[in-house]
Image (cartoon, grey):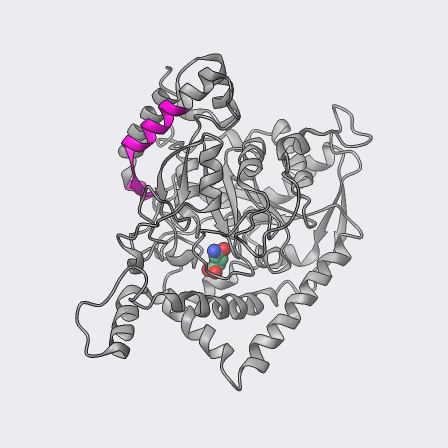
Amino acid sequence: MSGDAHRLGVAEIDRALARGEFSSAELTQHLLTRVAAHEQLGAFLAVDADAALAAARDADARRARGDATPLTGVPIAHKDIFVTRGLPTTAGSKMLAGYRSPFDATVVARLAAAGAVTLGKLNCDEFAMGSANENSAYGPVRNPWDPARVPGGSSGGSAAAVAARLLPAATGTDTGGSIRQPASFCGVTGIKPTYGVCSRYGMIAFASSLDQAGPLARSAEDCALLLSAMSGFDERDSTSAQRPPQDYHAQMLAPRDGATPAKPLAGLRIGLPREFFPAALAADVATAVRAALAEFEKLGATLVDVSLPRTELSIPVYYIIAPAEASSNLSRFDGVRYGHRAARYDDLLDMYKKTRAEGFGPEVKRRIMIGTYVLSHGYYDAYYLQAQKLRRMIADDFRQCFAQCDVIAGPVAPTVAWKLGEGSDDPVKAYLADIFTLPASLAGLPGMSVPAGFGAGGMPVGLQLIGNHFAEGTLLHAAHAFQQATDFHTREPQGVAA
Ligand code: GLN
């Protein structure tokens, strides 16, 4: 096997395995060596080399039998928020140190059934709360493009591992931007599907009405291959969308009516909400996003001005609803049923208090405090109920936009990745930086981050594409056409990927 097989994406690995250029066992060993050599990135929380190699040999046997899927033998890893039977699951929290689940999350089970080989579990912000991966109890993750900078969060380990070419693809979850924003900061492609497309069964709950799983990979094509395997109705998730299985790869390739080879996006109307291009948007991000949009025009798309007037309000709305749901979801960590229990305590109440004081980190505690406050008698009407009303209005604003356009585009984040330690002193500053990802989350809409250029310090900039409900195929098609015409998604961080 050539020594740079780690540079291949999912579709390329599928072709190489089909041609017998190397085996999954060889590729898996090569990547395990790279994972060990790049420990300083902090991307992995657990690796099981023996299990990975055994799964790779099974995949090679399955390929030889001729019943492979495109993912059979492709190495991946999971954000440590998905429960796994074979590997520990921590959700980035001391609360779950040493926890082993008796079952696999549906997303994990489906990818394994397709033949994907799991190398391990990836670092993330504690209970997926954060935008920089600095809230993990197991240390920060470093950005492969500049180790002094954050990879974004909360799926920071997933984005960093894919960017550093430790893996062709990884799973992530997105409650308010946690797939799109780290994908943008690390120069990889990520998609958060419509709420309900991927099962939440076995995904440790943060904010249940917002949480969605999705893939991070090098390209839209690779994301389409993963999403097809990960998604689909699951009777064990009561909010799972009842739809037939989707072939996102075929949807991505299906030509548009009126398209030509030179203008594959002919007729596609891309809406630019004026609120996504405020004066405060960093100039380097604005320049890269505008240049990417000009490329979309060359491919035949037309740009139309639209408005999402409640964009700014999505921040207080999200930071009321998400903590409210989190405070309820995290009540299960009581020292009785899961994970950590204080060693010394006086009585039951004291056991609860000490267990939770020791097990949760500061950001998680802050969210529980906010959540219980906004849900408490006397404040519910003033905060939680108002936030729910505004959430509906934000969804209505999108509905009006989609009467004028097929896809909405803008930046993923107001800046490129910041330096480690820069955001950790001021939580509100970090919350404000979520402004462009929160609206689609609140409306349950699919969103993508597509590498679109580079900004200050040579750091990657992502373009966000937002689609109507269940329009993942449209997003992937547009992103694929862009990636056929540009090479931002193939650029590698220097020094790490070689
Ligand atoms: N940054 C947001 C938060 O801290 C989003 C996190 C997420 O999507 N999981 O809540």
Location of the N terminus (image quadrant): top left
Residue 432: x percent and y percent?
52, 63
Asked if residue 151 lies left or right of residue 384, the reply is left
With respect to residue 274, does 12 lie above or below? above
The region drawn magenta spans 40-58
Q: Which part of the image, by quadrant, shows the C terminus?
A: top left
On whether residue 52 falls in the magenta region, the answer is yes
Q: Is residue 370 visible in this depiction of the protein?
A: yes
Q: Main secondary structure of the magenta part?
A: helix
Q: Nearer the viewer, residue 226 or 66?
A: 66
Residue drawn 60% across the image and 31% down it: 483
Question: Could you tell me residue 411's position as x and y percent?
Answer: 59, 49
Name of the residue lying farthest toward the bottom: 378
Residue 234: % across, % down: 56, 48
User: In the displayed structure, would residue 330 be above or below residue 35?
Assistant: below
| Farthest right residue in view | 258
Q: Is residue 210 left or right of residue 23?
A: right
State the residue in front, 434 or 70: 70
Quadrant for residue 355, please give it: bottom left
Q: For residue 323: magenta? A: no
Residue name at image x 69 percent, y 44 percent: 471
**Whether residue 287 is visible:** no
Nearest the viewer among 429 and 442 is 442
Q: How many marks?
A: 0
Point 47% across, 16% down: residue = 65
Whole-percent x and y of residue 240?
59, 52
**Looking at the image, which residue is at 28% across and 39% down?**
39
Residue that protrudes farthest toward the left in the picture:
344
